[in-house]
Amino acid sequence: MSGEIYFTNNYRDMCQEYGTGAGFQFEFDCTRCRDAWRSPFEPFLTGRAAGWIGKGVNAAWNLFGGNANTISNAADGLAGAGWGSAKDAAFQRAVSNAEHHFHRCARDARHVCDKCWNPAQGLCFDCAPDTAAEAEAARRRGLNDQVTQAAYTAGQQAGHDWDVNTPRQLVCPQCKAETHGGTFCAACGHRLSAPPACRSCEAPVPDGAAFCPGCGSRQ
């Protein structure tokens, strides 16, 4: 890896300025698999001291009915004055450590972890996929494509026996359930009506019609 590395959109700032948990920590993630690496926690002693001073002074002044805002604000100001430079230095150390856990792809400039890195090519696996893995994936795609085509052909053959001329009720008029073209409703058992077909031309014949509207034959 090069001596210079930039993390712009794949890290999370976990730093805390004040309190007993004040300190610096950053979490970096692989832009391919999103696995994360977290830098070691570095305590910010000034921020911790400000928190301790604030709590101690507040407790004492509250005990005697006074106001400790001035002293607490001074302690917070002392911590804030050194926060920015200390955080920048901690971030630089975190980035230096992160260099040992991530690789920068020369093609798409993304940072990836060891699992997503092709060391033989010096590229990430998105830019230089593993040949064996690609071959197995292609073999599976070919198998699935062939099975899909065979199933489609079988469906075409089965379609020859499907009555495409008879209208079907897709919603039960009694309970409003979907019928999926069945003769009876699977939800309530209601017999689904379908217009009778002409015995001669198989055209739909309205209820009560004496003659077929399609061919004129008597029903």
Image: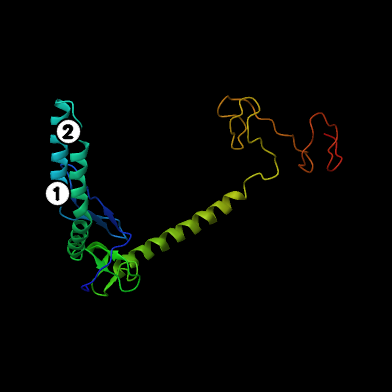
Q: Which of 123 and 12 is in front in this view?
A: 12
Q: Residue at x 83, y 38 (%)?
A: 212
Q: Where is residue 120 in the image (x, y as percent from the top left)?
A: 24, 74
Label 1 and label 2: CA atoms lie apart by 18 Å
Residue 117, numbered circle: none
Query: Please, which colouring scheme is shown?
Result: rainbow
Amino acid carrying mark 2 in the image: Asn
| Of pointers 1 and 2, the one earlier in the residue sequence | 1
Q: Name the residue under label 2.
A: 58
Would residue 29 appear left or right of 198 to someone viewing this image?
A: left
Which three-letter amino acid code belongs to the residue tagged 1?
Thr
Read off the residue under disc 1.
46
Label 1 residue SS: helix
Q: Which residue is drawn at 54% across and 56% down?
A: 153
Say above or below: 55 vs 45: above
Closest to the observer: 13 or 112? 13
